[in-house]
């Protein structure tokens, strides 16, 4: 059985980074190493949410390179159910209301039973201090929580980074999109359905989780 991995926005964003700060160069290097050395059984997926966020990167060359990296991946279908899960996350304060993209990514990866969500967002997603809270809320919703990991963790190395300039860029984009779409699940779902059609997305079909012991 393949390992289903959701690729969040910060992965193609760091892959295309050109800034020269040491911590940024390190994360770019680890991202590229991970991307260039896939696990034999992995299946990468992404979403229209990722595409929309990347389309707001100001640097045109970086934007195009980021989009090109994930253009061939299957996309998880953004439905009203995803938007409703996102609203539950925000109401339980898993994610800030002004940047609903974080909640969208987790909702997509959880609803579609992804094994992992790979990200450099260590504030709201790959954060050990939030893991228990995330699992509890997902359990209330009957959802399985994916492993929330960075490319560095998948390379089985250890390092600490402190500077988050590229992440700040993505968070600004998420706040802009959240302000535009608001918190109406039907509006958000309709928006991303249109986005998927615009992208000509190959949509991943959700598989029900296999019960323990079967």
Image (tube, grey):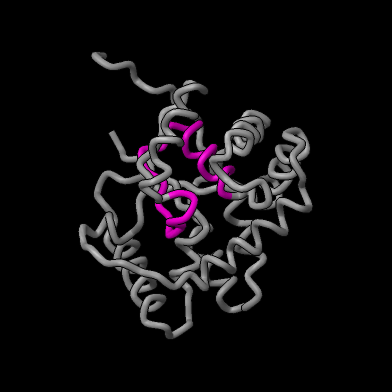
Q: Residue at x 71, y 55 (%)?
A: 177
Give percent across and percent down for residue 161. Answer: 36, 69
Q: Is residue 118 magenta?
A: yes
Give percent across and percent down for residue 134. Answer: 45, 36
Q: Identify whether 2 is placed above or below 175.
A: above
Q: Quadrant of the C terminus?
A: top left
Toward the bottom, the furthest residue is: 20
Q: Is residue 193 magenta?
A: no
The quarter of the displayed image where residue 57 is located: bottom right
Q: Identify whether 209 is placed above or below 129.
A: above
Q: How many marks?
A: 0
Give percent across and percent down for residue 14. Answer: 45, 69
Q: Quadrant of the N terminus?
A: top left
The quarter of the displayed image where residue 3 is located: top left
Front residue of 208 and 131: 131
Magenta residue span: 102-125
Q: Residue at x 56, y 67 (%)?
A: 168
Q: Residue at x 63, y 77 (%)?
A: 60
Give percent across and percent down for residue 96. Answer: 61, 48
The quarter of the displayed image where residue 171 is located: bottom right
Is residue 23 shown left or right of residue 213? right
Q: Residue at x 35, y 56 (%)?
A: 150
Q: Identify whether 147 is placed above or below 213.
A: below
Is residue 108 shown left or right of residue 49? left
């Amino acid at each position: 059985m393949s390992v289903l991995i959701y690729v969040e926005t910060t992965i193609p964003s760091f892959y295309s980074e050109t800034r020269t700060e040491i911590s940024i160069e390190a994360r770019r290097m680890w991202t590229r190493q991970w991307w260039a050395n896939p696990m034999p059984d992995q299946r990468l997926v992404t979403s229209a949410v990722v595409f929309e966020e990347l389309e707001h990167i100001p640097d045109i060359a970086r934007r195009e390179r980021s989009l090109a990296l994930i253009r061939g991946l299957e996309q998880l279908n953004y439905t009203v159910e995803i938007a409703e899960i996102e609203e539950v996350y925000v109401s339980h304060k898993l994610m800030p209301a002004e940047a609903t993209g974080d909640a969208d990514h987790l909702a997509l990866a959880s609803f579609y039973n992804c094994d992992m969500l790979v990200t450099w967002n260590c504030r709201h997603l790959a954060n050990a201090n939030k893991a228990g809270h995330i699992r509890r809320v997902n359990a209330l919703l009957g959802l399985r929580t994916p492993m929330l990991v960075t490319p560095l963790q998948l390379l089985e190395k250890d390092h600490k980074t402190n500077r988050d300039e590229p992440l700040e860029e993505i968070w600004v984009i998420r706040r802009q999109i959240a302000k535009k779409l608001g918190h109406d699940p039907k509006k958000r779902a309709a928006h991303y359905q249109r986005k998927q059609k615009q992208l000509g997305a190959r949509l991943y079909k959700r598989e029900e989780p296999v019960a323990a012991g079967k």
